[in-house]
Amino acid sequence: MKAKNKIPTVPISGFLTNALGILKNPLPFHHKNFEEQGDIFRLKIGLSNSVVFVRDAAFAEYVLQKNQKNYTKSKIQTEDLVKYIGKGLLTSEGELWKKQRKLIQPAFHKKQLENLLGSIKRAILTEYDKITDNTNTDVFPILNDLAFQTVVKSLFSSAASQEDINRLQYITEAAQKMLVRELRQPYLGWWFSWSGEIKKHLDLTLEARQILKRIVNERRLSQTKENDLLDMLLDAKYDDGSSMEEEQLIDEILILFTAGHETTSNALTFITQLLALHPEWQEKIYNERLQIQQESTDTIDLVTKSKDCQKVIEEAMRLYPPVYFIDRVNIEADCFKGLDIEAKSNLLFSVYEIHRHPKLWERPTEFLPERFNEGSRKFSSQYFPFGAGPRKCIGNNFAMFEMIIAVSELLSIYKIQPNFKTIEVTPLISLKPKNAFLTFQKRN
Ligand code: HEM
């Protein structure tokens, strides 16, 4: 297709005059520009730097799926993040990524995940013991610990001590916070290096790697089979029959911690907030669970048959997608709908805006889980909380299983009430909740 038009451009003055507001919450600024400029616009952020913002669902599908070979992830994932968590599934490109994806994918197949349901449920119930009823509670820290514990217990069963888990969680979160500071305040780069902040976090990462090596070696020596994710990763073989090298395995474990923990805790927090605002859906999920359990108390039946619960989770991730932007850079120049996309353009696909686009969704800002009555496939080109194409989230089934168990178990014990009027967000690397204050009231 031949290019006819240039992408509408917001000048650098538009960026500079709104810089403070953008730093606090860029979503209203993006929304205003989409409304004024259309579904694809360029924002100048320097003399020669610009970012192309997109809320065109067809363009997202084109880049993430149809012509994905011409698009790579941005430097944030393939360089900045690498120094803390290494090069693996989330952070690599090309042959290394292909090889790792092929090796690790089977561990995340639904059938294989069934082995993990017991560990996931135990981790969740242990965290719920921390809830105090009838008190104003910030639910985010509880669900954050829950998500981390779930990933660790799925990887290592009971092999990691609580002390190791706490340290690993502390280091994972500290490294993530450091990266957020580096990305949001690039002009302080010299200070982060000079003051030793970066080195301190790199040392912490080395400490995490030592802890993980110890756990992995103990498992290798023990010769026992736990059927957990670690066993799957240790047993997995490349096409030539070899196994993963130790350093690569540690990179992948750090990546699973990072990719699988914050996203899920954000999603779970938004879900509980929406449920608090919509008690009728709490009752639906509670009654659905009672019905399922009349026939079977197996966790696999709960996760596969809880359709109302699944709809609520899907609708919550439509309104509040934890990964609210997906970034790509094109290798060669491209053209979409007559628009010229020059080589090496920085593209940001706003999952948040596509999920709320008034031309794609009826009553887009309302919480209506029933729109997913026929499943999320119905909206496959405009609904992609887990991404799309070959780089789609490898943990999507894991996350759905975990969230269904977490929501269903929570509502079997408590009714939830909101201590806020509207849901507020903090958009950092992921979309984070801001005011998740709830009261839990024990069911009789
Ligand atoms: C609600 C929870 C989650 C959400 C919303 C989510 C979302 C996403 C998205 C949008 C991507 C694609 C990013 C891109 O294309 O640039 C992704 C990739 C990934 N996710 Fe998730 N994720 C979640 C949970 C998990 C969990 C639980 C795990 C593992 C335990 C996980 C592991 C990964 C990995 C390893 C990748 C990189 C895959 C690749 O590039 O081949 N995620 N996730």
Image (tube, rainbow, N blue to C red):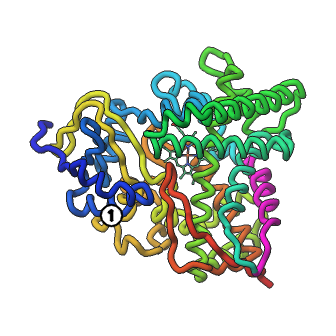
Indicate whether residue 128 is drawn in magenta.
yes
Label 1 packing within 10 angstroms: few (<14), some (14-19), many (20+): some
Find the magenta span and give its range.
114-134
Residue at x 24%, y 63% (from the top left corner)? 35
Residue placed at 71% from the left, 22% from the top? 246
Mark 1 residue element: loop
Where on the picture, by quarter, is residue 278? bottom right
Residue 225 position in % (x across, y down): 84, 34
Q: Is residue 212 left or right of residue 392?
A: right
Q: Taking 180 as reference, is 32 left or right?
A: left
Residue 342 visible: yes
- Decide: is 53 above or below 251: below
Q: Which residue is mark 1?
A: 357
Q: Quadrant of the C terminus?
A: bottom right
Tell me the chief SS of the magenta region.
helix
Asked if residue 67 is positioned above or below residue 290 in the image, the reply reads above
Pinpoint residue 64: horizontal percent, then vertical percent.
38, 41
Instruction: Name the residue at 26% across, 59% down.
Output: 33
Task: From the top left corner, tell me how far across and down residue 125 is, in percent.
Answer: 79, 62
Residue 390 lies in the magenta-colored region: no
In the figure, residue 257 lies in which quadrant?
top right
Query: 383 above or below 49?
Result: below
Q: Quadrant of ligand 1?
A: top right
